[in-house]
Image (cartoon, rainbow, N blue to C red):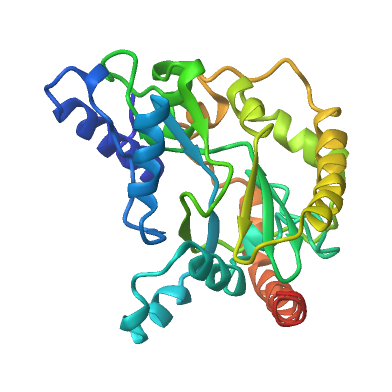
Amino acid sequence: MLNLNNRKQLLHKIYLKGFRSEKRDHRKVYFLPITADEIYSSGSFYRLFLRVLKKKYDCVLENKILVNSSFLSRLHKNKKKISLSASSLIRLSIKDISNFSLNSILNTNLFFNYNATSIFYFIKNHGLICRGFLLHPVIIKPKKKIDKLNGFLDYYIVEEYATSKKIFIIDDANLFFKIGIDQNITDNFFPYDANKYAKSLNRWITKRHFYNSKTLTKIFYKKIKKQKYYFENKIFSNLYFDLSSKLNTNFISHKKHPRWISSNVKKNYSMIFLCKKLLSPLKIIINTYKSIILFGFRKSRI
């Protein structure tokens, strides 16, 4: 049952309404569940559909970078650059990367985002390589009619409606690339620890999410030499394999997923909640200090 007072569930109610409004045979329709807070590189859908039709994929999953909301105002001021190539959009998004994505980079040696849904590895003067767990379906041609959505889209729809052998995970951002607008500030002040992050992932990843992470996505704005790529990718792969070895293989089911169930639970204003409210001024000071450090990182490393 959907709770319309919950903003996250309301979004998925809108998705479901859109799916149900299509009266043709869903097995013959390509759905594009996109949202208004996404920006795509020029020609992305053209290139992607050529690949989909040629290889006969039924579902496409993608990784993305989250940027600060100020990114939009900069685009608006320079209207000549509304149409951006993949390399240009990648370069700009890395310069204006949000704290959520920035703190998901494993080799920053700063803070790590233990709520990260994808992990990144930064290669200076080239871009990022990425392995994503929670990937968004940018295209789906379902194996049956989509008449229910008993879970958040990224947790439910692929496992329930996609044919596993016809799923394509985008492995090169120069084929298809998008960015999302992020309003969040992560409240994590600790460096990366594989055991701690594995515990966090074990609370929510499904078998599909784990399988997603096996595909590496290159997000490069500049061509990289094979030798350098091999060296950097080996480091990143070792970090990933170390993390995956610590995961519990008894994965969460997409049905009655705990995040979906918990979204229906009414929040109780407990003593813990009130204490957090009282400490909010301290939180603002810490986040301001943290933002200064991260700003310095962007200028020196990206």
Q: Image check: 2 left or right of 283?
A: left
Residue 134 percent across, percent down from the top left: 57, 37
The front one of 18 and 299 is 299
Quadrant location, the N terminus:
top left
Q: Residue at x 54, y 59 (%)?
A: 66
Residue 177 percent across, percent down from the top left: 48, 54
Residue 164 percent across, percent down from the top left: 50, 17
Quadrant location, the C terminus:
bottom right
**194 w.r.t. 163: above or below:** below
- Which residue is farthest bottom? 77
Q: Is residue 57 visible?
A: no
The front one of 106 and 47 is 47
Residue 241's quadrant in the figure?
Answer: top right
Residue 58 percent across, percent down from the top left: 38, 24
Residue 43's quadrant in the figure?
Answer: bottom left
The front one of 21 and 61 is 61
Q: How many marks?
A: 0
Q: Is residue 172 visible?
A: yes
Q: Residue at x 34, y 36 (%)?
A: 12
Q: Residue at x 26, y 16 (%)?
A: 145
Residue 223's quadrant in the figure?
Answer: bottom right
Q: Residue at x 86, y 63 (%)?
A: 109
